[in-house]
Image (spheres, grey):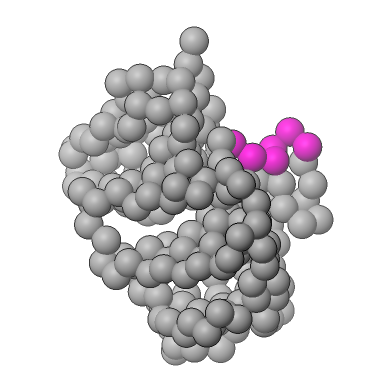
Amino acid sequence: MGVINVWRAAERYPGGEPEAGIESWHAFSFGPHYDPDNLRFGAVIACNEERLAPGAGFGEHPHSHTEIVTWVVEGELTHRDSTGHETVVRPGDVQRLSAAGGVRHVERNDGDVPLTFVQMWLAPLNPGGEPAYEIVHGIADSTPYAVPEAGAMLHVRRLAEDERTAVPDARYVYAHVVRGEVRLKGEKLGPGDSARITDVRDVEAVGLTTAELLLWEMS
């Protein structure tokens, strides 16, 4: 029998360095917030909402054995990494850094307005390998973004009020509301809320307002 577990924005763990202009909200066990019952769902091991004040950012730091996918909500994210990539990520872009055997990167708000982005970490099926980087500018709703290294696919859904969209039928689906309000199987979800869907078929999401929804389809 399938299961849908709803997790509210208010249940996320606070983090970051507010005095340095960094505010973080973690949907999964993260850093000092260790929760053995909330380590991962499917391939997803982190879903962090990051808010950076102008001029704030994360200095160079390492990652390994992680697929890191970033979605900018508002503002612009400046990314630099040890493989030589330097890019600006804007709303509508999908950025992926495949940390593989090890990579270092910097993430900053070099703009003059606040930056908000959602960063999702996925566990690879096979650790190791060479780091890789990709950015897709202005991804369309009808274009899923595949992360085969993690056996996962990202679907972006931008809904008008009363618009319906089918949730993928999959072993695991992780749904995160970026903005607006949606109804999912009778549950009303708002910004920062998420649903962890296991083995449920024929699920629809309905926009109660204009809304933006990220759906991870995982095998």
Q: Residue at x 66, y 63 (%)?
A: 101
Q: Would you say residue 210 is visible in this rendering? A: no
Between 189 and 126, the one lying in front of the other is 126
Please state the extent of the stretch shown in magenta in the rendering: 36-41
Q: Residue at x 81, y 56 (%)?
A: 32
Q: Would you say residue 201 is visible in this rendering? A: yes
Instruction: Residue 111: give x, y in percent of width and height.
Output: 44, 88
Question: Is residue 3 depicted above or below 23 in this figure?
Answer: above
Between 3 and 104, the one lying in front of the other is 104
Q: Residue at x 56, y 35 (%)?
A: 42
Q: Residue at x 65, y 76 (%)?
A: 104
Instruction: Residue 158: give x, y in percent of width and height.
Output: 25, 51
**Can you tell which quarter of the image residue 163 is in?**
top left
Question: Is residue 89 depicted above or below 86 in this figure?
Answer: above
The answer to whether residue 188 is magenta is: no
Instruction: Residue 12: give x, y in percent of width and height.
Output: 63, 48
Between 75 and 155, the one lying in front of the other is 155
**Can you tell which quarter of the image residue 75 is in?**
bottom left
Q: Residue furthest front?
A: 129
The answer to whether residue 39 is magenta is: yes
Is 187 placed left or right of 16 in the picture?
left
